[in-house]
Amino acid sequence: MANPNLISVTDIRGNTAYVLPANTTAGQTNWTHNGTTALTGLTPVANSVNKINSIVVTNLTGSNASLYVSIANNATWGSGTAFYIAYNITVPPTASIIVTDRTNYFYVTENQSVGVQSGTASALSFVASFEVIT
């Protein structure tokens, strides 16, 4: 497992990924980026690190919905321990909440993953902006 030296960066690529949990099961990790590419848990490819610049959650329904966002200490979210970044936060109807932004970004290494959960199936859209750093 590599954790690149951020002083010796050779490449930085901007990306946006999204997930719409279809059920209320904890730890939805099936993020999509570049339109079709699956990115499980926002876990970076070998020899890189993902800098998560923002996660914005939007409630697509007319009722309150709860959000959960956590980072796990394993590339396979369900196999690790979840450490919550946001826990049981209510998103009002047709509103958005910024869970994290550039002022409190965090890194995801090869041995970590990000999982999200919606308290109501198909109610919340999670969008992450991140940089792949190698």
Image (spheres, grey):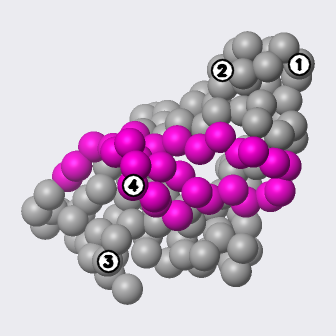
Q: Nearer the viewer, mark 4 or mark 3?
A: 4
Q: CA distance from mark 1 to mark 2?
A: 13 Å
Q: Is residue 105 depicted above or below 96 in this figure?
A: below
Q: Which residue is mark 2?
A: 96
Please rate how many residues cluster around mark 1, counting C-alpha atoms within 10 Å: few if below 14, some from 14 to 19, many from 20. Answer: few
Instruction: Assign a secondary structure to mark 4.
Output: strand
The relative height of residue 28 versus residue 120 in the rendered view (above or below) is: below
Mark closest to the chain's N terminus, 3 or 2: 3
Q: Amino acid at mark 2?
A: Ser
- The residue carrying mark 3 is 46
Q: Position of residue 40 (x, y in %)?
A: 52, 64
CA gap, disc 4 and disc 3: 16 Å
Element type at marker 3?
loop
Question: In the image, what residue occupies the spot 76% across and 36% down?
Answer: 122
State if disc 3 and disc 4 touch (CB < 8 Å): no
User: Label 1 sits on what residue type?
Assistant: Ser
Report the disc number at residue 129. Answer: none
Q: Is residue 42 magenta?
A: no
Please provide the residue range marked out in magenta. 12-40
Secondary structure of residue under mark 2: strand
- Residue 103 percent location from the top left of the image: 46, 34
What separation in Å lies between label 2 and label 4 (alpha carbons)?
Answer: 25 Å
Q: CA distance from mark 3 to mark 1?
A: 41 Å
Q: Nearer the viewer, residue 131 or 65?
A: 65
Q: For the view shown, which residue lies furthest in the bottom direction?
A: 1
- In the image, which disc is placed on residue 63? 1
